[in-house]
Image (tube, rainbow, N blue to C red):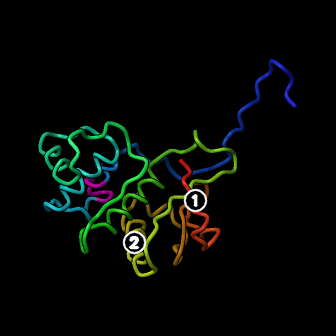
Amino acid sequence: MIAPGRKRQQPTANIKTKFVMPRVSFLDAMQDPELFGPWFTSSQSWETWRTFAKALFGEPLTAAEIEVFVRHTGRHTAPTVPAREAWLPVGRRGGKSLFAAALAVYMACFRDYRARLKPGERVVVMVLAADKDQGAVVFDYIKAFFENVELLAGLVDKLGKESRHDPGSGRLVPPPSRSHSGVRDLG
């Protein structure tokens, strides 16, 4: 027990990382040729996804992007804060898997969660799929990001069939359970 009036000392981090990830927005990562840019060429369909990314993270939209936002959502006011959750009714071959993979890698590697974690707690970024085939498509994109983006390649020691990124050890490790019943809102 700590005596009254004394502050508990904050534990010092014992985690050694190879490098610090740069601060970059998801939209910038989508456009950066050194990050996700090669996967998101400048076609019109990716312009719509870029607008969605800005809305998802509550970034300001241009007049043209607001038109796209209104057309696809029916809402007339764009969000100004990041969304906690998003549902996307997108048809086949619409880019959902690639976008989900890039978003998962971004959330796992480019965000700092230390202020929200207790000592010993780890961040888990999950991508849920309707079946194993869909999950495999997303995983293949995730794997491609780690294998082809030089900045990310240093974070992976071994890439397995089912893995998760552990920023503390700088590698992907297997999930603790195969059960979806443990999925819950942690935000």
Q: Relative to residue 67, is residue 174 drawn left or right?
A: right
Classify mark 1: helix, strand or loop: strand
**Callout in the foreground (1, 2):** 2
Number of residues whose C-alpha sits closer than 10 Å to that of mark 2, classed few (under 14), some (14–19) or many (20 or more): many
Q: Nearer the viewer, residue 8 or 33?
A: 8
Q: Are marks 1 and 2 in contact (CB under 8 Å)?
A: no
State the residue position of label 2. Answer: 138
Looking at the rendered structure, the kind of residue marked 2 is Val
The quadrant where residue 113 appears:
top right
Amino acid type, callout 1 = Asp
Query: In the rendered image, which residue does mark 1 sit on?
Result: 166
In the rendering, at what x and y percent does residue 5 appear? 80, 18
Q: Which mark is residue 33?
A: none
Specify few, some or many for label 1: CA neighbours under 10 Å numbering under 14, 14-19, or 20 or more.
some
Query: In the rendered view, does 63 fall on the left or right side of 54?
Result: left
Instruction: Identify which residue is drawn at 41% across, 52% down.
Output: 85
In magenta, the rendered stretch is 30-36
Residue 20 part of the magenta segment: no
Horizontal arrangement in the rendering, residue 103 relative to residue 187 (left or right): left
In the rendered view of the protein, which quadrant contains the N terminus? top right
Which residue is at the far top?
5
Task: Name above or below for residue 155 compared with residue 76.
Answer: below
Given residues 134 and 36, the one toward you in this image is: 134
Instruction: Tell me which numbered mark, 1 or 2, is placed earlier along the sequence.
Output: 2
Is the stretch drawn in magenta largely helix, strand or loop?
Answer: loop
In-front residue for pair 1/187: 187
